[in-house]
Amino acid sequence: MHLLFSRLTSLATILALASQINAKSTPPPPPNNSTCEPLFGKIEATNGGRKIGVVIDRSGSMEDTDPSNLRLVAANLLVGKLISSGGITTGQTADQVTIVQFNETAEILYPLGDPSGAGASIDGIPANGGTFIGGGISAALDELTRSGNKPDNAGIFVLTDGADDPPSLISDTIDSINRAQKAGIRVSFGFLSVDAEEQDSRITSAILSSGGTFTTVNTAEDTSKLVAQALLNRLVGPPSTGSVPLLPGLKTAGMLSQTSLTTFSYAAQQGEAFNVTVTAIDKVSLKATLKEAGKNTEIKSAVTDATTGVASLEHTALATGNFTIEVTSTTGGSKSGLFAVQIGSSLDPCKPSNTTQPHPSGSPLIPTGANSTYLPTPTSSTVFTAGAVPMRDVALQMGVGISFVAAVLEIL
């Protein structure tokens, strides 16, 4: 009896160890602030009437770059911020949405209709196959413009982690974006992996020309901010002549040849320390200038380094207010080129707070609070690529499994 009890105790220990190893290899759940409700709660509602195509990458690489399916969280979050027929108030018109998934082929999961019924089509989107981004954009565009659908006040929002594979598909993706632009439809990209320096510059230029944003997350939990920025920048309409709103943790592409995208805006709280990093993508020398919104007085400026192509500015806000970041060519004239801009801050807009401030883009509000400790590294292009199980863990799991079988056989 004593021998049996001892063996059972050993078996219990092995089972506990196996459970711990298995838990370690299980993909982590979405971070607690993955929906960033404090931020979205301060973005004021629109009048609706928008037609939005949400295009979601389901290629095989998503298993590694997005093991917690944060792109699905972001897609559901965006759909939840649209106005359904059952949620309209005085002066509002219901939005419409279509959901498209793609790998090497595209499929419409939810035809253009009321946002309230779209959530089920997003949940459970798998990950396998190749990547043809243009196929997803074309499918959404066709749905937004098919007979009976007027493409006015329409936009397409793409959630993906990479580039077209094979690269020969890039030209088709560019054609799809340009076709959307000609129809007056904005195309915005949210990337979980490939940032502006790595993406084909022609795709980035086409996105910005449509009036959309090209944004890369710095960490997984920043995925929801892609949606927030798209809403702040407006999902629909012709290219804006105003500034593009920035949020901490996101890297946003700009194009020097378009005045609408050479000025960026940021809302800061009193005492907030933030830094601005501008990185030249094309071979062009840039000057980044920080100003207080509404004033033409320069606070500080920096020129991109000749070797790294990076310019950095640091500032601590003495009072709550809005700032602008102007990016210009140091050579003057009409020199064009792509660049990326990123904000690092001591505050996290996704943390709960009791104070708010107006966002420089107008009516939307950005929450702030002294209880945040958000400190991304603005000069890093590090992106979320977690999810793979280290080989040492695989070996350990195999060892535990063998030990477990041996223990059972011995007891039996």
Image: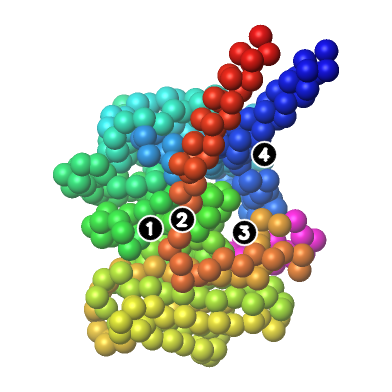
Q: Residue at x 59, y 75 (%)?
A: 274
Residue 308 tag number: none
Instruction: For label 2, count other residues whose C-alpha is less than 10 Å away and answer few (under 14), some (14-19) or many (20+).
Output: some
Task: Please report contact status of discs 1 and 2: CB closer than 8 Å, yes or no.
Answer: yes
Residue labelled with disc 2: 383
Within 10 Å of disc 1 (Cα), the crowding (few <14, some 14-19, many 20+) is: many
User: Mark 3 and mark 4 in contact (Cβ < 8 Å)?
Assistant: no
**Mark 4 vs mark 1: in front:** 1
Q: Quadrant of residue 152?
A: top left
Q: Residue at x 75, y 19 (%)?
A: 8
Q: Find the distance from the CA under tag 3 to the CA under tag 2.
A: 28 Å
Asked if residue 366 lies in the magenta stretch, the reply is yes
Q: Secondary structure at mark 2?
A: loop
Quadrant where the N terminus sits is: top right
Q: Nearer the viewer, residue 279 or 411?
A: 411
N-terminal label among 4 and 1: 4
Query: Crowding near pointer 4: few (<14 within 10 Å), some, many (20+)?
Result: few
Instruction: Name the foreground residue: 260 vs 165.
Output: 165
Q: What residue would you read off at disc 4?
A: 89
Residue placed under numbered mark 1 in the picture = 195
- Please name the amino acid that badge 4 sits on: Thr
Point out the stretch of residues depicted in magenta. Answer: 352-369
Closer to viewer: mark 1 or mark 2: 2
The numbered mark, 3 or 1, whose residue comes first in the sequence reads: 1
Q: Is residue 328 visible?
A: no
Question: What residue would you read off at disc 3?
Answer: 364
Q: Earlier in the sequence, mark 4 or mark 3?
A: 4
Q: Earlier in the sequence, mark 3 or mark 2?
A: 3
* Dot 3 crowding, Cα within 10 Å, few <14, some 14–19, many 20+: some
Q: Secondary structure at mark 3?
A: loop
Q: Are marks 3 and 1 in contact (CB under 8 Å)?
A: no
